[in-house]
Image: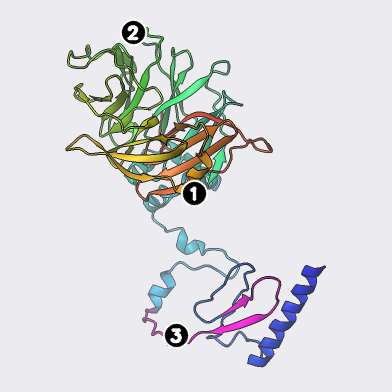
Amino acid sequence: MEGVAMLRQLIGQIQELWELCGSPPHHHHRDQRWCFLNIGETSVCDGYCSLIVAGGRSSELKMVEAVKSPPTKKPRRDKATREKMPTIGSAGEMDQEIWKEFPEDLFEAVIARLPAATFFRFRSVCRKWNSLLNSKSFSEHCAQIPQSHPWFYTITHENVNSGAMYDPSLKKWHHPTIPSLPAKVIILPVASAGGLVCFLDIGHRNFYVCNPLTQSFRELPARSVRVWSRIAVGMTLNGNSTSSGYKIMWLGCNGEHEVYDSERNCWTRPGSMPSKIRLPLCLNFKSQAVSVGGTLYFMRSDPDGIVSYNMATGFWKEFAVPPPPHLTDYTLAESKGQIMLVGLLSKNAATCVCIWELQKMTLLWKEVDRMPNIWCLEFYGKYVRMTCLGNKGLLMLSLRSRKMNRLVTYDVSSREWRKVPGCMLPRGRKRQWIACGTAFHPCVTAVA
């Protein structure tokens, strides 16, 4: 009732203000504009006037007047030009006689720039727009659009057979169902490229590739080298999109490795590990492989460093790069072709997430950023573990301790830290724990 009384009093004072300033505006006064009151924030209407609620429960209003901008001279247009301009009728409907002549190729160019979530809503407009997923020209348009922030495909402890996708632009979780994936086997996302996600079953026996947005699916043939121990996996594109095919590589600690080519649909062993690469590799399995320009980078320990493999030339390299001191749970990342490192820096009872950049000349790690101190205070005195769920420019970090579970994203380019909302199933109330995941760039035309 108090709110209703305040609203009535507010309306009454607005009417009094209009009476003091003159009669209410009429439609023939072209220079008069309405200003809408937005409760909770200041509303400014083109520099004319703004009604501001003076803090708290007070209903006092202040009128802020601004100098009217001088009238601008409108350019002349001939009658024929004005008639050809797209117009919208009073009922909000577009003139069909004009818009039906809109060039068809521009439709695809415009729709290709829509966010992935918006595109799937627009598919219901007509059959033609729905068929764009199978259009070669539309796929070419999508390949020309610069990649936006990646999404994250994650697996939760409560639902190991179904994934949860996070869209950082909308700060929203999606819960897709991929019926082609085996229902009785735990499938883990291990790599991605071009909008496709590579899955590996928990027994390290079978590989699957899928587009989580369109559910385009492929089960890869059996490997020729039977290695059932833990392996590191990387994935690259042959060109700018999946239309040119993709390659997947797995690497074992003893140097066993194979490469899958989607164009040939088979696994091949390019050759044995060169003698200059010290074995065993002691791979860091918490760190996913990083892809830069067709080259995969794997993190190893004992000795600490990085091993790289060029998918086009088959050339191996090894770099001795010791990690910074007092570092735990560190993983590789990539941003605009630059190799990065993210990890937990723990000293005494203090723990903080730090970001390093690999210096190409010295092959040393240089610290470039760290989590805000006010966030790190939450970790003080706690045994914290960290998992990096994505390594493509935008990182998602899972930070957990005995009574804490935090998800945080870090934008390498803008150096911006953001908290991620809890992952909950639709119509659910319990917050789910993220077990593992990978980043992937959403692409509606990527075909497995």
Magenta span main SS: loop
Secondary structure found at label 3: loop
| Placement of 17 over or under 448, stated as above or below | below
Nearer the observer, 350 or 422: 350
Q: Residue at x 61, y 78 (%)?
A: 51
In whole angstroms, how far apart are the C-alphas of marks 3 and 1? Answer: 45 Å
Nearer the observer, 81 or 436: 436
Label 3 CA crowd tier, 10 Å (few <14, some 14–19, many 20+): few
Q: Mark 2 vs mark 1: which is more N-terminal?
A: 2
Q: Amino acid at mark 3?
A: Ser
Magenta stretch holds residue 340: no
Disc 1: which residue: 374
| Placement of 419 over or under 12, stated as above or below | above
Q: What is the number of the mark on residue 69?
A: 3
| Placement of 176 over or under 171, stated as above or below | above
Disc 2: which residue: 225
| Residue 174: image location, x then y, percent | 56, 38
